[in-house]
Image (spheres, grey):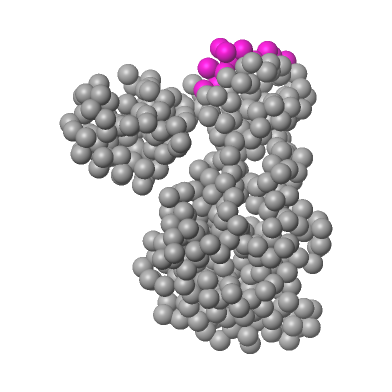
Amino acid sequence: MIENPFLLYGYEGPEYFCDREEETQQLMESMRNGANITLVSPRRMGKSGLIHHTFHYIKEHNNEFRCFYIDLYPTRSLTDFVTLLGKAVIGQLDTPVQKAEGFVTKFFRSTQLTFGVDPYTNLPQMSLSFVPQNAQHTLEEIFAYIAQSKVECYIAMDEFQQIGEYPEDNVEAVLRSLLERIHNVHIIFSGSKQHVMDVMFSSPKHPFYRSTERMHLGSLDEDKYYAFACRFLDQKKVRLSKEIFHQIYELADGVTWYIQAILHRLFRLSDVEVTEAVVQQTLVTIIRSEEDDYKKQYHHLTQVQAILLRAVASEGGVKQPTSGEFVKKHHLRSASSVQRALASLVEDEYLYPTDGGYIVYDRFMAIWLRSLE
């Protein structure tokens, strides 16, 4: 039983997942028909939730299929990547006979496999160890292992743009070459840095050029989200009007995680009418809990970066931050200094470029920044 149905992290089944029916169907149909997918959206829009939701129905359709989700965000090298993929996959595709004969330990020659017990779950746990210069060889063995199993495998590589920062030069080419040889694996390449993902999959200079179907994840439908919210809030006799929900939705720019964070707090109440005052107090509580972190981030910025970030927050969004009018209005040094600060803030994910202009990536941080004025 989930105590609070408005999840901030993880996936707990379709009951606690709002909509995305069209996107789920698109992912399933594309992969079933042999296409790999590039899934792009800003952070906190719900990519990982959608992936786990899709995997839920894939396994429900056929429990012999295997689904693997790996988050590449913390990886820094091909060695990290191979270790993460190996831990997810190795040992999961063996037949009972292969398990009995110790097939895995015989199959992998470039690495040492150690099996133990996770002290927290008491489940079998495998660890990999191999010499870094053999990482590519181990990667080849992992894909050969998947191929020989003949099991239909669905693998999601989240924050895939991270491989572009690895010190090794040929990771994209190696992966593309290996995937071309295997026919029982379907990949979701998901990422949050759109400009990087666009280059990786749309530039003729890159190995994955035009090799996948593209999919962009937008905001949830507001009416469906409202119905989803009311279904759970009604249980606590928390009354939320459509008008107030619209204010919440707009305040969060339709980004799933920020809406969930507010609803998560509202669900702690009981027998109350949600008013503008209640929403504002909820925001104050959330922002206070994040304030120390916001202060640390803010004080690590250069003076120009800090002024620019506050200026964008104050205006809600800016189309031309290097324009003379904007530079003068916010007492910035020059267009060139703004351009440099802008590039850094986008790279470090303080600002996010949208069709309507640049916005502060963290919606709650934007509210906090406006409170400094």
Left or right of 339 on screen, residue 214? right
Picture quadrant of residue 257: top right
Residue 119 versus residue 134 in the image, above or below = above
**Residue lying farthest left?**
333
Residue 12 % position (x, y): 71, 45
Does 280 lie within the magenta span? yes
Picture quadrant of residue 19: top right
Q: Quadrant of the N terminus?
A: top right
Residue 51 % position (x, y): 65, 52
Q: Is residue 132 at all visible to an observer of this figure?
A: yes
**In the image, what residue occupies the spot 60% across and 57% down?**
213
**In the image, what residue occupies the spot 44% across and 64% down?**
204
**In the image, what residue occupies the spot 25% across and 21% down?**
329
Q: Magenta part of the protein: which range?
A: 271-283
Does 298 lie within the magenta span? no
Left or right of 42 on screen, residue 49? right
Counting labels gives 0
Dominant secondary-structure state across the stretch colored magenta: helix
Residue 27 % position (x, y): 68, 53
Residue 21 % position (x, y): 73, 43
In depth, the one of 316 and 66 nearer the eye is: 316
**In the image, what residue occupies the spot 56% across and 64% down?**
211
Q: Quadrant of the C terminus?
A: top left
In depth, the one of 116 and 350 nearer the eye is: 350
Residue 205 versus residue 350 in the image, above or below = below
Q: Is residue 74 at all visible to an observer of this figure?
A: no
